[in-house]
Amino acid sequence: MLKQDLSSPPKGFGGVFDFVLRQGSTGVIWLGAIFVTAWSMWLISDIVFNGWAGLSYDFLTHTPTNAGREGGIAPILVSTGLVLAICMAVSFPIGLGTAILLSEITATDSWWGGMIRRSLDVLAGVPSIVFGLFGNAFFCNILGLGFSILSGGLTLACMVLPILIRSTEEGFRAVPIAQKLGASALGLSRLSTLFYILLPIAVPGLIAGFVLGVGRAVAETAALIFTSGYVDRYPESWLDSGRVLSIHIYDLSMNIAGGEAHAYTSALVLLILVLLINQTASHIGLRYLRRGVT
Amino acid sequence: MKNSKRYLNLTIALLFVFFLPATSFAAELKGKLVLTGSSTIAPLAAEIGKRFESLHPRVRVDVQTGGSSRGVADARRGLADIGTVSRALKPNEQDLLSFTLAKDGVAIIVHQSNPIKKLSNQQIIAIYQGKIKNWKTVGGNNRPITVINKAEGHSTLELFLKYFGLKNSQIKPHVIIGDNEQGIKTVAGNPNAIGYVSIGSAEYSATHNIPIKLLPMKGVPASIKNVANGTFPLSRPLNLVTKVVPRGLAKEFIDYSLSNKVHDLIQRQYFVPINP
Amino acid sequence: MILSNGNILSPSTHDRFLTGILWCFSLLASLILGLILFFLVYNSLPVLWDIGISKFFLDSSWHPSEALFNLTPMLVGSLLIMLGAILLAAPLGIVSAIFCRFYAPKVIAVFYQSLIELLSGIPSVVYGFWGLVTLVPLIQKVNPPGTSLLAGIIVLALMILPTVSLIADATFANLPKEYFQGAAGLSLSRFTLLTQIILPASKSGLLTSVILAAGRAIGETMAILMICGNIAQIPDSLFSPVRTLTANIALEMAYAMGNHRSALFVSGLLLMVIIFALVSLAHRAGKGSVYA
């Protein structure tokens, strides 16, 4: 936004101090960013270098054989896509709705709003393995869905909800009060206000929530071992068990002697998948942002 | 909101596609068999399941993991047709029927660069009790020993404790691990570590450029071969368990798993076939 | 939207419908926590009836197969790791977001943003694997055994950094243009703009980001299990191995039976109590200033 320093040259003692502080802060921020970049590149390059060799068209289109040491990951990609689709299809509307309710309909300091917020923050800290055991007991056994893509997707949806809601809510919170007052004064219905005023402005928060939600969902292992399961053939229905990428990576790296090479390649595929989803989400989001009335 | 509507339509459309009933062929064996339990057995069971499916196209074998205790619990409650348990059944589990599919040994491993050639049982006990703290004492380098133990309840731990006559609270570990591969990687990254893991995984890693070394037990070299011929003292059974005498599909599957038609699969997962 | 309880300016049926649906959604969202709590309590009860609560804090150690159930070291381990990771990740995450929004040239900012987004999608097992084969051997050279509190903090900080950074960034992106125009009109320096306007105006978003990151940190399992050594002891230095409550569940659930299994659910319950206390504390601290 503000790319140049617009201030006049510093004058006097306080000015010198201010100058040092200002230049120092720029340095610190650049240093911090470089540090984070180096740190994450260390990890990412490790995956890329070790996974690159195994990446091929065959790897993406074949079924795994010999417990995943050989063959490809095609059925696993399908299961991953389905679980992710269910998770997002369930959590996105609920998440968006709750975020709207929290930021726009309940009073900011209402008891109910506070309770919902608090329970969401607690939910965000529930360990994934507890989600897994819970999902197994509730969706698989009590609701009778068994080890299935549907159970897995629903368990994941419970898991990403807090992150989705809270970051979307921050998006709505940012809408200037003047615009809301204006909309109200014009007699716009809440629905119109929502679609023409609030949503366009809240897009950055929405994208952040979506990206974090998808990230958490595709990266999840423990919650899915007990719900969507371990079966690595093509799922034939929503009620079939299907192994997702992160479980495949976990199994190959921790349970199968000699599975590392394919574990790395699967991790690389996962990274590329995440990158694609995120780019698409930002792209769509930004187009909506431009369309909106701001 | 528009998004949600689109998602909903998509979901409904896909649901229809997936629930379309498949055209059925008459075959003598059909249905779905669910196996849950030990993560050690899971890859093997899945491979056997795949071969079984290819012989009986109308059969689906679903293998799930979650640990041996889950295998016992699910078999008991009827949530699974067959439970998989990577240890012998305990006295209070005698209500279940067990079928031993294969065997797996437990080997003591150290880093490849460690000059130690062998350790006596007394030395291993002393190291695990924290009485020997330095490799120098047992004839190695002057380096502190890092003791790696398994987490409470794991069958390899129970086997280890029983064999050496130890109680878990007597052991003074520096690292506690869960899976075998975690143990191998921890030892490979630490020249002063000692641990014990499944023999098959260890032998595979040692022969595939992972810097670990298997120590002999009482003079018997640790190898799959010696587990197979019964000379290696530390081994555990890999079991299939059922609540009732298996019938129909479950019986067919268990019979098939215990036959010599799956020996190559067992060997490819680095376990020891025992059924003739 | 402006609160229009009893407001007849827009008596649209759509509105009533919308509000109804939204209430249902939010009830559903909070119901999940209720169900999970019920599930944990239900599974913990057998051991709580059997041996009571005090043994979980007063026993000499954690050896459930010998009926010793002390959870205190793991409680301390969980809290220390979370605290360390937050201390590292919160400033770095916020600095990252500031860098992206206000300092970096556009090309770098886009690249940097994708990098952070990518980090959020890496499975924890990959972080754990990387920590185990790369980081732990490095630390081991300095101070054995390598699997330690420090390794956990470093890896966990990297894992939760995207949560802090992306939410902080979205908060900055949402600040009204008028703030920046006003600042430019007053010819404020970028530093002053940052410290006097941007950060105070984003307080709510920043607090949310840190709370969510803390939740993720305390709930993390797989990576921690692989790199922290899992010894149930109160650590005496950064290089000591520790076990967290989550690792305790994941490590032992596979083979646990009876009271042991039930005790692992108590670990989960204890974790929830702690998270609840922390969240309440954070909300109280933020009250008035944040949600006003």
Image: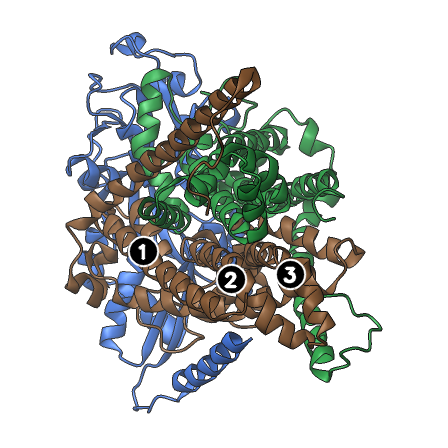
Chain colours: A brown, B blue, C green
Q: Amino acid at mark 3?
A: Ile
B126 sits to left or right of A171: left
- Where disc 1 sits, the SS reads helix
Is residue B149 visible in this depiction of the protein?
A: no
Residue B206 x %, y %: 18, 34
Mark earlier in primary sequence (1, 2): 2
Q: Tell me the CA gap for discs 3 and 1.
A: 28 Å
Mark 2 belongs to chain:
A
Asked if disc 3 and disc 1 are in contact, CB closer than 8 Å, the reply is no
Which label number is shown at residue C246? none
**In this figure, which residue is indicated by the disc labeled 3?**
C32
Q: Residue at x 20, y 25 (%)?
A: B112
- Where disc 3 sits, the SS reads helix
Q: Is residue B71 above or below residue C105?
A: below
**In this figure, which residue is indicated by the disc labeled 1?**
A270
Q: Residue furthest right?
A: C6
- Where disc 2 sits, the SS reads helix
Mark 3 belongs to chain:
C
- Please state which of residues C40 and C292 is positioned toward the viewer in this rendering: C292
Which label number is shown at residue A203? 2
Q: Is residue A78 above or below residue B217?
A: below
**Circle nearer the viewer, 3 or 2:** 2
Q: Tell me the CA gap for discs 1 and 2.
A: 25 Å
Q: Residues within 10 Å of mark 1 (few under 14, many from 20)?
A: many
Residue B80 x %, y %: 47, 66
Residue A235 x %, y %: 35, 73
Quarter where residue A225 is shown: bottom left
Q: Amino acid at mark 1?
A: Leu
Residue B138 x %, y %: 29, 11
